[in-house]
Image: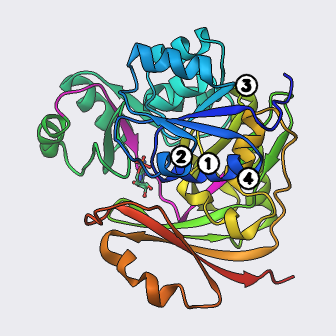
Amino acid sequence: MDALPPGSTLGILGGGQLGRMLSQAASRLGFDVVILDPEENSPAGRVSRGQIVAPYDDPNALDVMGRVCDAVTFEFENVPAASVDRIRAGGARVAPGPLALAVAQDRLDEKTFLNGVRATTVAFHAVSTIEDLHAGLDRLGMPALLKTRREGYDGKGQVWIKSTRDAAEAWDALGGRPCILEARADFVRELSIIAARGPDGSVAIYPLGENRHAGGVLRTTVAPAAVDARTDKAARRIARAVLNGLDYVGVVGIELFDLGEGRLLVNEIAPRVHNTGHWTQDGCACDQFEQHVRAVMGWPLGATLPHSRVEMTNLLGDEVDRWAALSGKADLRIHLYGKSPARPGRKMGHLNRVRPLQH
Ligand code: AMP
């Protein structure tokens, strides 16, 4: 696929912080960016050439995106497949493709795909009825984690089941929707790997990050993570298997459970730039946002070698009010998303603490 020249227009579905940082990277490479987001004055819209304010399934808006944009991408995975088809019909290329979206939108399809490309996950059981749930608990043992197949994020839409007596309550709590029951992963830590693939099949993989969550939300990523050669090799193999298996174009975020001794399980994949990849902005010559734009626009992929060690910390809710003190610290780079209000737990920005890489 030909490289789109500077001056081409990139469309982004979603106007949040990921869209904003993608837009900033795209404009640095000389592209114009148009955002589609139902909310006026979105964080991404405010740094772009323009924003179409409409729902993600609005036929007129999608037709305009398809006509005006040379390529279209997205900042979230729950983009309706019909919207992607409609944009494509207008003439724009869309990346990542429909298979990546379909797989990432359904936890059961995702785990089935992953195991099919030998990217191992926890054992799991499809649950459509309370009887399925009991059968799954018998098979997987307890505790086990019941998750909705679709539309869960940041720990939402999931309930731990510790005894068969909790089963009915858990099933009701998730609204009797189609679910997946997962065995518990006995991990020592959570890692993630950010990787990219271009339309020519070239692959670029960043070093692993180590992640800490609080209340289901990412707090910090430290990267490059201290990992042994076996773990590093296993993660790279998984990244290649996922990218090639999906015939992927763009950046993917892959969340991993580290079981120790080089054994990794895949938790989930995000077909987009990822919060655990924000460290690359200050740790690598080509960050994940530029990398995604390069892949989608058909440019050669950029270098993923780290030049610094970075500790990324999310600024949640009113933590962002400390911007004045934080912005005065020499080793901190502050990234703010231009959002308001600072509702509790809302991702308002992040800090990258930058240290020289130790050799
Ligand atoms: P998710 O929404 O699937 O990314 O899950 C959110 C968090 O729940 C993960 O980051 C893990 O800390 C935890 N978690 C998810 N699935 C499992 C599992 N099968 N076993 C243990 N912990 C899990």
- Residue 5 in the image, given as x and y percentages of width and height: 83, 33
Q: Is residue 251 magenta?
A: no
Label 2 belongs to which residue? Answer: 19
Label 1 belongs to which residue? Answer: 22
Q: Residue at x 20, y 48 (%)?
A: 163
User: Which is nearer the eye, 258 or 327?
Assistant: 327
Choose the circle earlier in sequence order: 3 or 1. Answer: 1
Report the magenta residues as a range. 175-193
Asked if disc 4 and disc 1 are in contact, CB closer than 8 Å, the reply is: no
Q: Amino acid at mark 3?
A: Asp
Asked if disc 4 and disc 3 are in contact, CB closer than 8 Å, the reply is: no
- CA distance for labels 4 and 3: 27 Å
The crowd level at tag 4 (other Cα within 10 Å; few <14, some 14-19, many 20+) is few
Q: Which mark is residue 247?
A: 3
Q: Amino acid at mark 2?
A: Gly
- Residue 11 in the image, given as x and y percentages of width and height: 59, 32
Vertically, is 290 above or below 324?
above
2 or 3: mark nearer the eye: 2
Asked if disc 2 and disc 1 are in contact, CB closer than 8 Å, the reply is: yes
Q: Residue at x 45, y 48 (%)?
A: 16
Picture quadrant where residue 152 is located = top left
